[in-house]
Image (cartoon, rainbow, N blue to C red):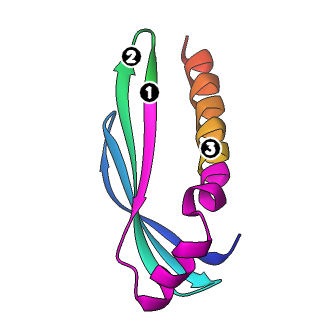
Amino acid sequence: MGAGTCTIIESKPGELVRCRMDWQRPMEGTSMVDFTFRPAGGGTVVTWAMYGKNNFMGKLVSLFMDGEEICGPQFEKGLADLGAVAVAATATTK
């Protein structure tokens, strides 16, 4: 979907992981991504949000492209992979 780097800039166990996304392609920019965690029943609800400032070109592109449609599947896959790792880690500690 593009190229860039992701750096974890804040982490609160069981509550939050905040990342800085530095995009190189398809266009340069910086976004913040938050993964928040909330206990629910016997599991955890994980929510992700991406936010940041758009320059003129970014605003123009956002009129024609849906950011959630583009990035959403990648984040959902990452969360599913994270869930599998968490379940596997829980199984090995029992």
Q: Residue at x 59, y 63 (%)?
A: 66
Q: Which residue is mark 3?
A: 76
Position above or below: 90 against 15: above
Residue ranking furthest to the front: 63
Q: Which residue is mark 1?
A: 45
The local secondary structure at tag 2 comes to strand
Cα distance in 3D space between marks 2 and 1: 6 Å
The local secondary structure at tag 1 comes to strand
Q: Residue at x 61, y 59 (%)?
A: 71
How busy is the neighbourhood of tag 1: few (under 14 within 10 Å), some, or many (20 plus)?
Answer: few
Coordinates of residue 12 in the picture (x, y in percent): 28, 43
* Tag shown at residue 94: none
Q: Specify the amino acid type for callout 2.
A: Ala
Proximity of marks 2 and 1: CB atoms separated by less than 8 Å:
yes
Q: Specify the amino acid type for callout 1.
A: Val
Cα distance in 3D space between marks 3 and 1: 13 Å
Q: Which residue is mark 2?
A: 40
Q: Is residue 18 left or right of residue 67?
A: left
Position above or below: 13 against 45: below
How busy is the neighbourhood of tag 2: few (under 14 within 10 Å), some, or many (20 plus)?
Answer: few
